[in-house]
Structure formats: C-alpha cells, structure tokens
Amino acid sequence: MTSGNYERIVEKISNISGIKKEEIEEKIKEKRSKLSGLISKEGAAQVIASELGVSFEDEILKLGELLPGMRNVKVLGKVLNISPVRSFKTKRGDESKVVNLWIADDSSNVRVVLWDTNHVALIEKGDIKDGTVIEIKNGSMRDNEIHLGNFSEINVSKETIEDIVTKKVFKEKEIVNFLKGESVSVRAFVVQAFEPKFFNVCPECKKKVEKEGDIFHCNTHGKVVPEKRAILTLVLDDGTESIRAVLFQEPLNKLGITDFEDLEKLSKQKGDLLGKEMIFSGNIKLNNFFNNLEIIVEDVNEVDMEETINKLEKSNS
Ligand SMILES: [Zn+2]
C-alpha cells in the first residue's frame, strides 16, 4: 500500500521547474479550492504541471508516479506476465490484434495494453517474454493502464531492475478522491448491507452459468454441476463520502459472511457487519446503471492488522 504518489509528483514538478515544493503545493491548494474541490490532489498537480510548462516526456517515470490521463509517458519495467494474444476485427473490418502485459519496477506494477501489430509481433516472436526489461515511450494512460498505439515505442532494454513490486498495489485514498480505474484501499465503516444475491458458476472456468430446463450449461464446458456463489452489496463510508461496495466469495468470508445455506445465520452475520470498521481494498468501476462509482472489493482486513503492520514497519526502520 502506498500513499506517496502525490508527494512524488510534487517533487518531480519541483525538480523540473525549479520551483520550491511548498510553493507548488500552495498552487495545487489554490487550484482545488477554485474548482470547489471537484478535482483530486493528483489531478490538480497535473493541471499545475501543464500550466508551468512542466512535461514529463523526457523523464523516465517510476510506475508509482503514473497518473490517469498522462500522455507521452516514458517508463522502464520488467515483464511479469503476458496475456494470450487476442485477434479482433476493427470497425473498418481489418483484422487486428491486442495483448496485455504486466510490468513492474521497484515502486509499483501496471498493466500495459499493446494495440499495434508491430508491437504485438515482438511478443509473438518471443523477443519480449516474462522477465524481459522493456522501455516504453509515448504511452498514454487510460484509467490506470498504459496504452500503446502506432505512435508509441516499445523496446527491449539492457537495464536491470531489482526488487520489483509484484503484489498488486492498492493506493490508500479517501473515498471522496476515488477515480475510475484505480486500485485503492480505504479504512471505512459499513453503513448499509443489502440482501445477498446468489448465482451459479461453472466449476471449471468459474464463469456464470444459466439454467436451461433442468441442467446448467457452460458455453465452454457444456453440461456442468455448478458451484453456488454469493454477491453482497454494502455501502461504505469513511467520513468524506460514501460508496457502494460489491463483494464476492473470498472477501465475504473474510468479513465473516460464511453461511449461505442457513438464511437465519446469514441474516445475523449480515447484521453484525453494520457499524464495523475495516480496511477495504479493490478496484474502482463506474456502475453504468446507477452512473456512479463503486468499489469491487478484492480484499478485506482488520483495522488492528494494519496498525500492527505499521508498528512493525516503524520498528524496522
Ligand atoms: Zn466452463
């Protein structure tokens, strides 16, 4: 978990522009109050950077310094994982390809999406594989991913990167500052819990299956005996704002929701959640139906646990 993103970006602006950090933070504060706080600290920092003519183009940014909306980014990272190459038809009817890879450095990790067939070919030929250190130029940030088009460059680098961050990084943030596409972590209270919903998944691929007559049918695996899954929606509040939170199996168990068969027990477990304060980590998505942000929770931790870790880190440094 890192919260140093904002501080790092202020430092970077200060280094490039030669203006004192305090002065830049003052400008950011002014900009935010002018916009009635509608913009995040990180967002305001970007606006100030462009007003000062500060460009990050010539600088190699750490992956932890990337912000949504940045253009022409230059980064260095070690490939952690590559998805299978996927073919698709463009609107014009041409055959095209896309591939995702995860890269990491010593600050964070990020998903990179390659849309250019020449770039995809580097993967297909095996020039870029797991463990390769690559340099990216002219990438664009779309939400929290780096997207590469025909104008972008991707090259194998001779640099080595030690101590890469392989664990998914959740940025500690207040709910009011959540942005679509971010992976965040927040300490918040459960203020509302809706009735859980149930659905069935294929035991092989874990995709949702529908009942056809008396049998369950998976598009890939045919007739299957499904596994039952639960989904629970909560409302979380951290004092700055509230947000809908969607939880599936594993985080639900960690929250103490375990009895999906015994509805009476389930109702009691659900009731026990109200007013509970915990650390929720997950991804911010736009809910198209309600047209607001929600968090898809991937992990839940006790507040005590966080304090213990903080203490341990302090005593180690
Ligand atoms: Zn299946």
Image (cartoon, rainbow, N blue to C red):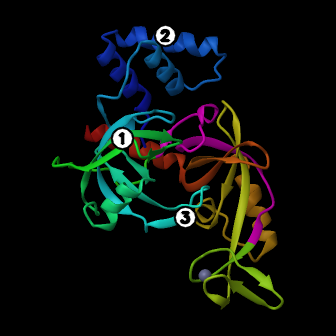
Q: Position of residue 265 (x, y in %)?
A: 76, 69
Residue 63's mark? 1
Q: Is mark 1 within 8 Å of ligand 1?
A: no
131 lies above or below 17: below
Q: Which residue is mark 3?
A: 88
Q: Amino acid at mark 3?
A: Phe
The residue identified by callout 2 is: 27
Q: Is residue 134 magenta?
A: no
Q: Position of residue 178 (x, y in %)?
A: 60, 36
Mark 3 and mark 2 lie on one chain; the one further toward the N terminus is 2
The structure residue drawn at horizontal position 45% and vertical position 18%, both measured from the top left corner, is 50
Packing grade of label 2 (10 A; few <14, some 14-19, many >=20) is: some
Image quarter where ligand 1 lies: bottom right
Quarter of the image where one finds residue 139: top left
Label 3 vs label 2, nearer the camera: 3
Label located before the other in sequence (2 or 1):
2
Q: Residue at x 80, y 56 (%)?
A: 194
Q: Is residue 214 left or right of residue 224?
A: right
The residue lying toward the viewer, choosing from 203 and 47, is 47
Q: Which residues are magenta?
A: 170-198
Q: Amino acid at mark 2?
A: Lys
The CA distance from mark 3 to mark 1 is: 29 Å
